[in-house]
Image: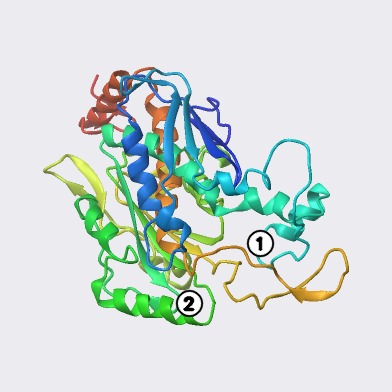
Amino acid sequence: MGPPGRLGLVLRFLTAGESHGQALVVIVEGLPAGLPLSEEDVQGELARRRLGYGRGPRMRFEKDEVTLLGGIRHGRTLGSPVAILIANTEWPKWSEEMSPAPGAPSRVLTQPRPGHADLAGMQKYGFDDARDVLERASARETAARVAAGTCAKALLARLGVDVLSHVVALGAVEARSGARPEPQDLARVDASQLRCFDPEVEEAMVDEVKAAAKVGDSLGGEAEILAYGVPVGLGSHVHWDRKLDGLLAQALMSIQAVKSVGLGDGADLAGRRGSEAHDAIAWDADTGTYRRETTRAGGIEGGMSTGDLLVARVAMKPLATLNRPVLKTVDVVSKEETVSFKERTDVTAVPAMGVVAETMVALTLAREALRKFGGDSLTEVVRNRDSYVATLREPVTEVGARDG
């Protein structure tokens, strides 16, 4: 869901479903009519979410069976809400344990896992079984977000915007080259075992995963998200809840296990002097546009996009569920010290987190693009966008005024 702004909710989405439930469902409202979209598009993005060395066995047989339930006819959106269902291929094994019909579970989980939503959720809602919390808190929910993000990416592509990600740190291993992939490099990034664009450190990252897996531990890391072609002026400086950097931070922080978000050079800027912390502005006579010479601010100034490359770094903590349960906890019934229970888990999900982060950036940018350009059909939105961009190239005749 997007936060309310001065013009209300332009694009919003809502997900429903549990990790081992029958299905996940997502409804996306506010897409313009005429946007090409297919089940294959959604399945392709969901397959990217399953990528990455260190994922658990579920990723090998989880096929993400997609059904478009509404809002699309003959491959194009209708302007009405788009409804997408993602079936759980494991449902037959969980149909009794997760049945919505009256009954009781076969096993009650009373040893909450540190670092997970288990205990706080049990206390908040009055549950005596951690499964009542963990099923919805699970990162499986992000599959529905990625489905929604497929719609947002399809819209952004028609506006000349591409969003992609790559892993820049895994455990103690960091990419050194500083090279950033461009849209044409996405296939190469996805072909990497850990979605890393720096081949010199990829094997070191794989070794890091192997070492953690050997002792039943987990790893966190960082992904960098890049948005190319973002037009000037998305977001606003006039209200706290309209600032693009604030909207992106909230969207990215909402991803399960994400603990830090930085735009551009992020926290590193705090240790620099002002003369070394900002992006110099230059005039490009060939294109008739301004540009920033660096990406220290991440393509956002004063809560608005600058028209330059948008850069965000997202840090994910190690997963709270370990293959070798050693984290101390307390049984909520006996109050005795014990260790947390074990659910099936990954060694790391940082490569997948990057794909989910792309989704949240795309949904945020798509919403702000629709707020800026408006329109009930794709043709109208694109026309409005083109007209706006054209005005940015008009010569200024006097302060505060343009020709005409």
User: Above or below — where is 85 with respect to 309?
Assistant: above
Q: Marks 2 and 1: CB-CB under 8 Å?
A: no
First of labels 2, 1 by sequence position: 1
Q: Residue 100 appears at what percent x and percent y?
A: 70, 37
Q: Residue 262: which numbered mark, if any?
A: none
Is residue 302 visible in the rendered image? The answer is no
Looking at the rendered structure, which numbered label has been put on residue 213?
A: 2
**Which residue: 32% across, 37% down?**
41
Rendered view: 206 above or below 332 = below
Name the foreground residue: 384 vs 260. Answer: 260
- Where residue 51 sits, quadrant-wise, is bottom left
Q: Residue at x 60, y 76 (%)?
A: 324
Q: What residue is shown at x 79% (from left), y 46% (from top)?
A: 104
Above-or-below relation of 366 to 20: above
**Spot occupied by residue 122 in the image (x, y as percentages of width and height):** 78, 54
Dot 1, how many residues are within 10 Å of its Cα: few (below 14), some (14-19), or many (20+)?
some
Q: Which residue type does callout 1 highlight?
A: His
Residue at 56 percent of width and 50 percent of height: 254
Label 2 – label 1 distance at C-alpha: 20 Å
Viewport quadrant of the C terminus: top left
On the question of residue 102 being in view, the answer is yes
Secondary structure of residue under mark 2: helix
- Disc 1 designates what residue? 116
- Tell me the quarter of the picture where residue 338 sits: bottom right
Q: Amino acid at mark 2?
A: Ala
